[in-house]
Amino acid sequence: MSIFRENKKNNKVKRVLLMSFEYPVGKTYCGGVGQIVKLCHDILVDSGYEVYVLISFHFNKKRPVKLLLPDGRLINYTNFYSFQKDYKWSYFNYIIQHFVNLSQEFRRIKKQKGPRPYIVYHFHSILRRERDSGFKTFNRFMINQERMIELSDMIICPSRYEYENFTRYFPAFVDKVKLIENTIEVFPRDKNEIEKIKDNYAIKDNDIVSIFVGRLERIKGAHILIANLSAILKRHKNLKIFIIGKSLEKDLYKKLMNVKRRFKSQVFYIRYLNKNKLFQYYYSSDVYINPSLSESFSLSSYENAYCNSALLLNKLPVFDNFKDSAVFFSNHDSNGNGFLSRFDYLLRNKRLRVKLSKNSKKAVKKIVSKSRIAEEFNKILC
């Protein structure tokens, strides 16, 4: 029996449906998009909204979907049609979607008669920019993103960097785009957990711990790190590197495993950690590596900055916020500014690492404000 009641919508509590291809439920991998959706969920709940989350990796109407209810229960539907039997679109006051695969369905919503939900498109990167940069962005995703930009009532942009790109790529829609910069959710330091990490991996006081967090794929720069691992590990016997993230490219995974076999006590690969435990690895780290070739915000860079890591970053415009608190490398400059030489420089200079870690913490505190994102969401949804 459907739970939908068409003309009995609660007038006091506004219902929000968040739609995403990932969300941190259970022990499945969840990247930066899912973490931001979770943060938006919590902000909206704290603001008094009744929040639902629809989760599907494919968002094809014949594929399974999951629905997270306001009371925390997770319902598994065999397909999208089953979900719509229980929840009509007009049941919700707002739909905030974080993917680009249902443009035809949203077109139908816009055309339906009577009350309909207000449609917000919260995007995380501009796919046309990624394609123009040479990455293999599937055309259907790119086309659907551009359709969603056209169809949405409001568009949320995650960073100033992408806002500037949006105004360049989509000048006709600047009147409905809103800049709400991403923020981070932080977890406190757990001394007992940190001691366990040190014991499990035989980390000594004079060791330098470095961490990379991200999918093993070229767009995240994983190939740059893996290609230089052997050379840097030979130079620094006291270096231990944690690589944490889902493997998406088999050749990179094989190369990483080959290096790992040769440096068993220095290289550690972990596919997934829940956020609280992941933060303890952040707190245990001295250097955070982000060789990514394309970022719109970089959640993990901000998180590591908060945890007092020195940052080694690819020279991307999105990282300008850390211009005084990081070491930058360039793939195009071999005159002492390449990845290997800059990483080596950072590892050899302890005083610099300490200075950068303090500066990065100050920078992230200045940049990120959770109260501001809550305020901006409330303005949009009034």
Image (tube, rainbow, N blue to C red):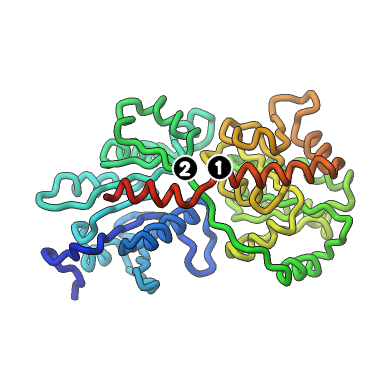
Q: CA distance from mark 1 to mark 2?
A: 9 Å
Image quadrant holding the N terminus, namely: bottom left
Looking at the image, residue 189 sits to the left or right of residue 59; the answer is right
Within 10 Å of disc 2 (Cα), the crowding (few <14, some 14-19, many 20+) is many
Q: Earlier in the sequence, mark 1 or mark 2?
A: 2
Please provide percent x and percent y for residue 346.
Answer: 80, 40
Instruction: Please tell me whether mark 1 sits on a helix, a strand or a loop.
Output: helix
What residue is shown at x 44% (from left), y 33% (from top)? 163
Q: Are marks 1 and 2 in contact (CB under 8 Å)?
A: yes
Q: On screen, 71 above or below 257?
A: below
Residue 209 in view = yes
Identified by mark 2, the residue type is: Glu
What residue is shown at x 19% (from left), y 72% (from top)? 2
Please provide percent x and percent y for residue 294.
Answer: 56, 37
Return the residue nearer the eye: 312 or 79.
312
User: Which residue is tagged 1?
Assistant: 367
Looking at the image, residue 266 sits to the left or right of residue 309; the answer is right
Please provide percent x and percent y for residue 271.
Answer: 63, 60
Residue 229 is marked as none
User: Comparing marks 1 and 2, which lies closer to the viewer?
Assistant: 1
Judged from this view, the residue extending furthest toward the bottom is 1
User: Which residue is tagged 2?
Assistant: 181
Instruction: Please tell me whether mark 2 sits on a helix, a strand or a loop.
Output: loop
Return the residue nearer the eye: 223 or 199.
199
Q: On screen, 169 above or below 77?
A: above
Please provide percent x and percent y for residue 265.
Answer: 84, 60
Within 10 Å of disc 1 (Cα), the crowding (few <14, some 14-19, many 20+) is few
Choose top left, top right, bottom left or bottom right for residue 44: bottom left
Q: On screen, 224 above or below 267?
A: above
Identified by mark 1, the residue type is: Ile
Looking at the image, residue 164 sits to the left or right of residue 97; the answer is right
What residue is shown at x 83% (from left), y 55% (from top)? 263
